[in-house]
Each structure stands twice: as structure tokens, then as C-alpha cells.
Image (cartoon, rainbow, N blue to C red):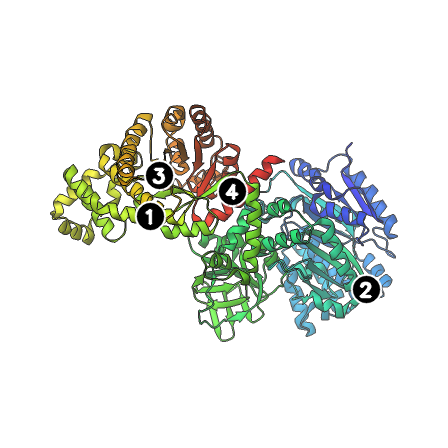
């Protein structure tokens, strides 16, 4: 029978850090710390696969009870205490721990083993009756809530009432007598709610807790967390049973959570919070507002020095920023957990950069540790420092960024209103794991209680959500759905703005400005004053050395092209010429061309557009000096450029010398039942070759003009919506003819490529023939997804989410490139195209070009580049490096 229970204690463990899939992250790291000689309370871990088996069968696997019994005996021998012994009782904690960290999403039980007899033994052994009954009431509350299903709030109501009758402000001030009475009240509550007495047998308590931890894998908050973070449902959680150490034993004891570096900024200094005379849940759950870790040096100096030595040792050993949970019992330090610390996006790049400089990790490891989503967060806007606004209050800056939205006080309401398209800020007295779905839906989170290591802070940092916590000057009333800050009351539905960098809370919807990274990239801030930007640049520089895929940008204007270059784009993969026609005089000339009665009229209108197009192309060539620029010829159907009634139609008819009925007939004549599959793309150029001629002339004249200024011009002309090679050849003949006229007439030579956008299944299936004439393929994955699935992107949004929720589709195919269908067409077209033309250049230019999973697929299919919006370029650069590194391992 395979081993399912693994012991750790006395400096030796049955497992180690490499057994996370078996022991879960927490269990593996407890074993590793034990082997390192770090002071860890002894215990044992039940493997993750047992959870999966129990959930499948709802029965304990054969032989498991004997294994657990054997390890309980080892724990008793190690500690010198026994389960249920009234003189030397063994008390344990029971905690979850999946292979992938899910902070706060599953259950924990502390002080297990207490009953009416052992509590007296604990009081005698500790010579502290108050401590013993404080531990007992905590155990009753936790076990009653997690295992027996008695609402946590019912216990809190009794606790609050006891504080009021005793005339004290905090739990720590309750007397032993008050706690004894509270224990009796808790037991009566449990009997009233469950119809049964609280279980006094420690072994029965233990199995109740173990099964509650397994069951917590299925709780909504845990399921939501796995869905958001892409964690498999079949991993299961380990169960860690560990001898208790007590931070609530008096003023020489305490508990805390700490990070080896600042998780918000990445600065290299020890960072965290602690409480004297408390247990761990008091810190993590925000039950009491903790003290900064530095103050521990005064309260518990010897333990603090030991903690500093331990945190340095653990970070050096694990070679990453660590998140530590610790307890000090009567002056002695114990580590309860270490794990890789959740961090903000700014901290992620800064820690990665610093650790390379410190020699802890390699550049390759640094690149792997920063995620594309974290880079995306660094590009988010922040509150404009020039805005004059008086904050309502100030809390702790738990997770950077700025967020505005309507105040919402219930996580379910937050989810509902966000689904309806509203921006919401979730406001809570403190968050709990049950609020997770509301946090996911919200733009940001505000809490009145809790510290920098509270649930809200840790979860929001991990998700890149803006958060302000511990705002002591606000009073949150979730019953009436409002909060007050001094004389100001904010009710549900009113706008507020929170600043996660400073902790300030403002009324209203404040304007924002670009982030530090964007400001430096655009030249409005010096890099010397931007430590995050410097780290960002270094990490991306390493990523560039590791990736194979080139990264281009979709840019239609010189300004967009300059932004793209600032973010490291290696050319333009899609310049949509139609976007140039919608401004000022251009739209008038375009409309004049559309309504012209003959070719001569169209050419007169196109002659007005020619210098405008040429000017745009010239600016883009200049911005992309030395890099390729792929220009797509006119693609949308012509009716999109015309008004469809109202005053605009009246003015247009007058300006074109038409009657309103005549203009209406023209517009109606252009209307199509299915315009996406209608008269658009190369079909326009074939019907009206003068359009293709004008655009080609503008490109080549601009190229010559730019070249004469010393610019290295590399135009690539893309023919859209090709279905047959004959369509491509028709348009290429026109382009090459114009090139010969312009370049020959101006006495210049400009190398250029002519290729096509593959966005129809037939084009992909006949790629070998098209590649005989085309020099590059750019896959328009937006339209290729539509035509492959037979879905309208604009309409499918009404039901595609149901397909994903029900498992019919793994992802929305317009967000993540469909590997089995669309991806297969792309792969086939690349292979067949290169068979005809080995030098064929291939890339994608749809929205998928900036999506990390799609980029990995593009790498695997052997494409040469991806193209995305300018602000997605850094994300694509990093994702391309991740794809290359993953493929090489």
C-alpha cells in the first residue's frame, strides 16, 4: 500500500520541497524547513490524492485510519503529550495546503483536542487559566463554524455581547471568568443549532476537522479561486496536522505574518505585521489591527533577532521572496509556514531584477517569475497627482493602482452589478474568503479593518487588484449599505476612488494619468526617477534575448507607431488604412468616392485622399525606421463610411449635390444582409481597381519621400480577405504596376513585399497555391475564428459565456486562439505555404496576438511574429519568451 501520511519533526521529515504534488505546498515546505533545522512544530501531512479519493467516494480509504493513528502516536512521542490526556494534553492545528497556493480559500482549525477535561490540564500546565479558556472558546468557534455548520456570525454576536457586558474594547481584555462563561454559551449555541452536543472525543474531533478540510476544496470561494487562476479541479488538498504552539500565552508570546521583501514595492527590507498575545487568525483575518514587524524588536527582542536570521536563511534557500507565518510561544520562535510570497506587479519585476543583481537567480529564472498579467498591471493608470481633491480618509496602501467605481457593500451585489457593466468598489468592514467572488468582480477593494497581510491585501496583490485596507477612520455598515468618514456618508451606488499606492479614499470619479512605465516610455518622465521602469526594462531585455517570435504592433497612426516603438515593437504587423478615412475632410472625400456615379468621379475623389494617405504613411515609416510596416488595403464594406439618416445625411446630401432621396437610394443599394461576408476586402479592389491603385501609389510615394530623408523603409502590402489565388494575383498585378510607375518615375528603389491576410478557411486550405504569389501570410484570427466557427463575434457574446461555463468550449475562441480548429488551419497553412515558398514570412495580427496562451500556440506552430495593440507589446514580448523557455525544457 502506498504511503499516504508523511511525518515531520525533530529535524527530519518524510518529504521535502520537491513533493508539492503529494504534500501540497504547505506540507512540502514544512518538511523542507524541518530538514533545514528551522524550528517547526512537529506534525504530519495527509497527501493530496486522499482528498480526491474521499471526494469521489465520500468514504475514508482503506487503511488510512491506521496510518493516521500511527502518526498521532509518533506526534505524542515527539511532544511528550497525549491526545485527550487531562494532565498533558496534545493539541493540534488542522490546515489545508494544495500544490498551488490558494491563500485563505480553504479551512483551518486551531486548538483541536480541547474539551472540558483537557482545558483544565492546559490551564494547570500553563499556569494560565485565562489562556486555556481563550484557546477553548476559539476552538469551539472555529470547529462549530467549519465542521458543524454553525454560522460564524452567531459566535461573534455572543463574543461582542460579552465584551459589552464586561465593559472591554477587545477580546484580549476579557477575564478568565468571562471566557469560561462564553465557552458555556458557545456549547449551548452549538446544541441549539445542530441538535447535538459538541464532540468531546479528540479523535472524533480530528476526523471531523480532516474531512472538513477535504470538503473545503469544493467550497464556492475555492472553486472561484481555481477558475480565476486556472488551477485544476483534480489536484485536491493535503491536510496538515501539527502540534499547537501558542501565541496567546501572554505578553511574551505573539504571532505574525511577514515577507522577506516588501510585497507592494519589491524593496529589499523585511516587511510584515505581528500581534502580542494572539493567534494567527487574528492577523490574517484582520480581527485585530496588527503592529508593524519592526516594533517586534521592542516587544519580543530575542524572538525578533531569531526571526531575522530565519527569514534571510529561508529566502536564500528557496531563492525567492518568502511569505512567513510564525508564532512566538513564551519567547521561543516557531515557523508555521513559508511559501512563495504573493506580490504586486511592481514588486514582481523589482524583486526579479534585484535577485539577479544579488546572484540569487539567473536572468532566465527572472523572466519566468514575472507573468504577462503582471506586466499588464504596470501599464494601468494612476490618480492624477495634479487633481485637487480632499480624501475622505486614509488607510493602508495594500495593492497599488487606482480604481473608481460605485460603492457596493455585498459581494453578491458586486458580482451582479459588475456583470451588468458597472464599475464597482467592494467596501467591507473586513473581507473573508467568502467574499472572493465579489473581489473578482470589483475594480478595487476598501476595508475598514485589517493590515497589510490581511486577506484582502494578500488576495488583491495576487490578482493585481487595487486595494486600501485598515481605513480606521471609516465606519462601514453593511446592513444599511453605507459608510461614514467623519461628517460624510457614502451610500451604495455613489462613486468613490481609491488609491492603492497611497491608501487615500476620495469621493467621486477622479481622473487618472499614465503609470510610471507609460510615462517613461512616452518621454514625460526621466528613467532615473523610475525604479520600477528600470526593472521592467531589464526583465524585458532578458526576455528579448530568450524569445524566437518577433513582436509587432497594430498601429494606424504615427502616434500609435511611436508608442509601439517605445514599448519595443519590432515593426507594424497591421496598419488598417480605413481608420485613416474617418477624420475631417477625409471622410467627406471618402463619401464622395463612394457615391460617385462612374470611375472618373471616383478617381477625382481618390485624388483628394491620396496626399492624406501619403502623409500618414510617411509618418508611420519614420516612426518605424528600420522595421517592417505591414499596410492592409481597404477592408470594410463601403456602407460603413456613410451616415444612415438624421442631420448628418441631410448635410452630406447637400455637400455632394444630391437630393436626400438620391442619397438614401445609394445607401440602401450598398446595404448587405451579411456584410462581413459581402462586398469588402480584395473584392472592393477587384470591383474598383482605382482604390487599390491610389493606396499603392500613396504607399510608394511616401516610401520614396521617407527614404530620401535617410529613413530605412520596409513596406509590406497586405491584400485582405483573399479566398482564391486568382483574387490575390489580380490585386498584386495592380500593386506591382503602380510600384513600377512610381519608383521608376522617381528613380528610386524600395524593396517591398506583397502578401495576404489569411482570414477565410478556403485561403488556409489553398495556402500552397496562394504562396506561389504571396510573400507573406498574416493570419487575421478575428475573422478566421468567425468564419471557422460560423459565429458572429458581435452577436456570440450573448451566449458564448454559457458555452464556457458548461464546458462546451474551454475558452472563448475570440479571446484565446482555438487550437483544435482555427489553430489547425493556421498550422496547415504555414506548412503548405512554406512548401511552396520556403522564405514565406508568417504572423498573426488579430487580438490573439497579445494573449499569452495564443502566443505560446503561435510559437509552437512556427510563426515568425505576432502583432498586437501597442500597449500589449510588452506582454507579448514576455509571453513569447515564456513560450520559448517552456519549449526548451
| Number of marks in the rendered image | 4
**Residue 191 visible here:** no
Q: Residues within 10 Å of mark 2 (few under 14, many from 20)?
A: some
What residue sits right under mark 4 in the picture?
852
Tell me which numbered mark, 2 or 4, is placed earlier along the sequence.
2
State how far apart marks 3 and 4 are (Cα).
35 Å
Q: Residues within 10 Å of mark 4 (few under 14, many from 20)?
A: many
- Is label 3 in a helix, a strand or a loop? loop
Tell me which numbered mark, 1 or 2, is placed earlier along the sequence.
2
Q: Name the mark nearer the viewer: 3 or 2.
A: 3
Q: Which mark is residue 750?
A: 3
Q: Which mark is residue 530?
A: none
Image vertical order of residue 508 relative to residue 823, above or below? below
Q: Position of residue 634 (x, y in %)?
A: 29, 40
What residue sits right under mark 2 in the picture?
331
Q: Position of residue 882 (x, y in %)?
A: 57, 41
Q: Position of residue 217 (x, y in %)?
A: 63, 44
Tell me which numbered mark, 3 or 2, is placed earlier along the sequence.
2
Amino acid at each position: 500500500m502506498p504511503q499516504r501520511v508523511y511525518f515531520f519533526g525533530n529535524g527530519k521529515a518524510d518529504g521535502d520541497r520537491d513533493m508539492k504534488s503529494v504534500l501540497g505546498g504547505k506540507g512540502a515546505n514544512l518538511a523542507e524547513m524541518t530538514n533545514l533545522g528551522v524550528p517547526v512544530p512537529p506534525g504530519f501531512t495527509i497527501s493530496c490524492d486522499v482528498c480526491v479519493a474521499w471526494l469521489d467516494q465520500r468514504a475514508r480509504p482503506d487503511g488510512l485510519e491506521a496510518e493516521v493513528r500511527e502518526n498521532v502516536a509518533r506526534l505524542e512521542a515527539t511532544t511528550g503529550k497525549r491526545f485527550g490526556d487531562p494532565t498533558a494534553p496534545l493539541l493540534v492545528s488542522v490546515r489545508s495546503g494544495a500544490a498551488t497556493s490558494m491563500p485563505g480559500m480553504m479551512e483551518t482549525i486551531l486548538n483541536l483536542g480541547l474539551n472540558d477535561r483537557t482545558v483544565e490540564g492546559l490551564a494547570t500546565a500553563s499556569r494560565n487559566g485565562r489562556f486555556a479558556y481563550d484557546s477553548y472558546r476559539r476552538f469551539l468557534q472555529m470547529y462549530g463554524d467549519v465542521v458543524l455548520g454553525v454560522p460564524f456570525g452567531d459566535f461573534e454576536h455572543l463574543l461582542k455581547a460579552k465584551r459589552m457586558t464586561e465593559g472591554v474594547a477587545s477580546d484580549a481584555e476579557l477575564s478568565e471568568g468571562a471566557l469560561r462563561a462564553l465557552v458555556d454559551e458557545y456549547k449551548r449555541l452549538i446544541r441549539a443549532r445542530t441538535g447535538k452536543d459538541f464532540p468531546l472525543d479528540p479523535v472524533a474531533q480530528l476526523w471531523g476537522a480532516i474531512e472538513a478540510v477535504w470538503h473545503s476544496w469544493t467550497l464556492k470561494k475555492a472553486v472561484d479561486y481555481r477558475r480565476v487562476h486556472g488551477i485544476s479541479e483534480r489536484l485536491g488538498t493535503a491536510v496538515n496536522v501539527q502540534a499547537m504552539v501558542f501565541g496567546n500565552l501572554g505578553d511574551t508570546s505573539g504571532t505574525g505574518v511577514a515577507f522577506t521583501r516588501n510585497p507592494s514595492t519589491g524593496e529589499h527590507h523585511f516587511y510584515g505585521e505581528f500581534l502580542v498575545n494572539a493567534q494567527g487568525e487574528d492577523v490574517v483575518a484582520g480581527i485585530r489591527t496588527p503592529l508593524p514587524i519592526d516594533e517586534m524588536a521592542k516587544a519580543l527582542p530575542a524572538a525578533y533577532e531569531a526571526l531575522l536570521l530565519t527569514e534571510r536563511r529561508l529566502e536564500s534557500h528557496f531563492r525567492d521572496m518568502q511569505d512567513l507565518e510564525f508564532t512566538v510561544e513564551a519567547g521561543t520562535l516557531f515557523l508555521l509556514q513559508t511559501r512563495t510570497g504573493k506580490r504586486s506587479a511592481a514588486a514582481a519585476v523589482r524583486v526579479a531584477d534585484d535577485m539577479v543583481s544579488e546572484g540569487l537567480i539567473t536572468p532566465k529564472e527572472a523572466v519566468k517569475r514575472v507573468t504577462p498579467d503582471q506586466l499588464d498591471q504596470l501599464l494601468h493608470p494612476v490618480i492624477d497627482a495634479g487633481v485637487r481633491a480632499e480624501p475622505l480618509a486614509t488607510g493602508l496602501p495594500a495593492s497599488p493602482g487606482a480604481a473608481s467605481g460605485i460603492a457596493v457593500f455585498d459581494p453578491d451585489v458586486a458580482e451582479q452589478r459588475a456583470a451588468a457593466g458597472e464599475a464597482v468598489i467592494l467596501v467591507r468592514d473586513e473581507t473573508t474568503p467568502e467574499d472572493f467572488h465579489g473581489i473578482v468582480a470589483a475594480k478595487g477593494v476598501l476595508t475598514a479593518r485589517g493590515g497589510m497581510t490581511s486577506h484582502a491585501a494578500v488576495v488583491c496583490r495576487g490578482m493585481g487588484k487595487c486595494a486600501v485596507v485598515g481605513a480606521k477612520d471609516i465606519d462601514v455598515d453593511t446592513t444599511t449599505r453605507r459608510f461614514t468618514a467623519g461628517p460624510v456618508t457614502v451610500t451604495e451606488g455613489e462613486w468613490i476612488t481609491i488609491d492603492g499606492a497611497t491608501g487615500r479614499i476620495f469621493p467621486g470619479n477622479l481622473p487618472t494619468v499614465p503609470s510610471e512605465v507609460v510615462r517613461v516610455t512616452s518621454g514625460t518622465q526621466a528613467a532615473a526617477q523610475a525604479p520600477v521602469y528600470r526593472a521592467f526594462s531589464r526583465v524585458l531585455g532578458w526576455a528579448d534575448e530568450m524569445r524566437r517570435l518577433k513582436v509587432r504592433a497594430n498601429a494606424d497612426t504615427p502616434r500609435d507607431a511611436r508608442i509601439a516603438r517605445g514599448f519595443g515593437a519590432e515593426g507594424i504587423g497591421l496598419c488598417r488604412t480605413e481608420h485613416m478615412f474617418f477624420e475631417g475632410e477625409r471622410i467627406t472625400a471618402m463619401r464622395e468616392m463612394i457615391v460617385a456615379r462612374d470611375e472618373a468621379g471616383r478617381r477625382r475623389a481618390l485624388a483628394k485622399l491620396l496626399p492624406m494617405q501619403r502623409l500618414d504613411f510617411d509618418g508611420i515609416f519614420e516612426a518605424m525606421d528600420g522595421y517592417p510596416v505591414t499596410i492592409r488595403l481597404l477592408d470594410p464594406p463601403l456602407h460603413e463610411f456613410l451616415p444612415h439618416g438624421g442631420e448628418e445625411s441631410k448635410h452630406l446630401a447637400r455637400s455632394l449635390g444630391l437630393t436626400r432621396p438620391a442619397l438614401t437610394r445609394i445607401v440602401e443599394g450598398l446595404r448587405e444582409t451579411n456584410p462581413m461576408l459581402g462586398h469588402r476586402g480584395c473584392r472592393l479592389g477587384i470591383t474598383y481597381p482605382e482604390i487599390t491603385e491610389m493606396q499603392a501609389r500613396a504607399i510608394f510615394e511616401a516610401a520614396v519621400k521617407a527614404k530620401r530623408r535617410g529613413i530605412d523603409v520596409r513596406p509590406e502590402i497586405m491584400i485582405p480577405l483573399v479566398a482564391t489565388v486568382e483574387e490575390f494575383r489580380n490585386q498584386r498585378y495592380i500593386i506591382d504596376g503602380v510600384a513600377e510607375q512610381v519608383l521608376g518615375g522617381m528613380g528610386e528603389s524600395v524593396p517591398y513585399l506583397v502578401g495576404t491576410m489569411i482570414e477565410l478557411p478556403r485561403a488556409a486550405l489553398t495556402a500552397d497555391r496562394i504562396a506561389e504569389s504571396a510573400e507573406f501570410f498574416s493570419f487575421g484570427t478575428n475573422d478566421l475564428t468567425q468564419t471557422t466557427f460560423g459565429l458572429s463575434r458581435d452577436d456570440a457574446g450573448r451566449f458564448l459565456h454559457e458555452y464556457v461555463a458548461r464546458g462546451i468550449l474551454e475558452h472563448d475562441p475570440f479571446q484565446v486562439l482555438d487550437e483544435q480548429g482555427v489553430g489547425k488551419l493556421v498550422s496547415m497553412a504555414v506548412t503548405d505555404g512554406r512548401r511552396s515558398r520556403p522564405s514565406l514570412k508568417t504572423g498573426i495580427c488579430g487580438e490573439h496576438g497579445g494573449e499569452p496562451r495564443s502566443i505560446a500556440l503561435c510559437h509552437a506552430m512556427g510563426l515568425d511574429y505576432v502583432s498586437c495593440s501597442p500597449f500589449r507589446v510588452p506582454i507579448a514580448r514576455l509571453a513569447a519568451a515564456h513560450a520559448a523557455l517552456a519549449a526548451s525544457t
